[in-house]
Each structure stands twice: as structure tokens, then as C-alpha cells.
Amino acid sequence: MENRYDATLANDPTQSSCIWNLAPGGALYLTLWRRTPAEFVLRATGTTLVSGIGDREGYFDGIHLFVLTGTIELDVIVRSAEPDASRRERSVQVARTVAARL
């Protein structure tokens, strides 16, 4: 990963995000939200489950990986020309690294 941009929204104390440019192309977006388990369930409806990362997790549409650890929801998005399986694996690696530090 090359460049990182912080995109914390000053008017939203429940959300913080970063963006990294990927080489040779694409981007990785990481957003952290304050969520209750009930709020996370509503957002995770219709996802394919990925286990072993947080308290609850789900993978959605080949782009988003949602993970709930305590009251922090991670939303990892990988946009690149990689196949779905590669984007998913990259998302899982990022989520595991971040969740271990929460």
C-alpha cells in the first residue's frame, strides 16, 4: 500500500475512516463505527459469513467485509481489479490485523 488518507468526519463522533492507494491500482477503505450488536445485525443481513475475526462478521457482495468486535464495527472495502477471492483475502487480513488491536 502506498498512500494513506484520513477521512474522519468532524461532525460524526461515531465514525472514522482511512483510505490507502493500492499498487498497482485500486484502493482499500477502512471505516470504524460505534455500533451495538443489534445495529450490526441489521447491517449484516444478507451477507455471506466469514468466521474467526471478531464477535460477528459477514462478507457482502465481493466488496465489503463487516466485522463487529465489542462495540466497534469494521467496514473493509477493497476496490481493485483482483478476483473476488483475492479481494476477500486482503479484506480478511486487514480486519484480523485491526481487530487484534482493538
Image (cartoon, rainbow, N blue to C red):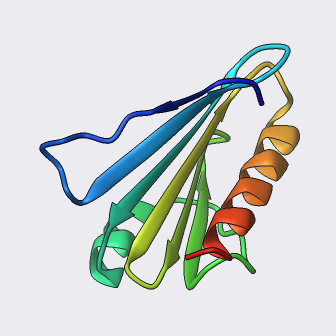
- The reply, left or right, for residue 35 in relation to residue 85 is left
Vertical relation: 78 (above or below) 30: above
Q: Position of residue 19 (x, y in %)?
A: 54, 32
Q: Position of residue 91 (x, y in %)?
A: 72, 50
Vertical relation: 13 (above or below) 54: above
Please give the name of the residue rendered at 31% of the width and 72% of the height, measured from the top-left corner: 35
Labels in figure, total: 0
Quarter of the image with the N terminus is top right
Q: Quadrant of residue 24?
A: top right
Vertical relation: 43 (above or below) 35: above
Vertical relation: 52 (above or below) 82: below
Q: Position of residue 79 (x, y in %)?
A: 66, 27
Please give the name of the residue rendered at 33% of the width and 41% of the height, measured from the top-left corner: 8
Q: Quadrant of residue 39?
A: bottom left
Quarter of the image with the C terminus is bottom right
**40 or 6, which lies in front?**
6
**11 or 35, which lies in front?**
11
Q: Position of residue 11 (x, y in %)?
A: 12, 44
- Residue 5 seen in render: yes
- Residue 45 seen in render: no
- The reply, left or right, for residue 42 in relation to residue 93 is left
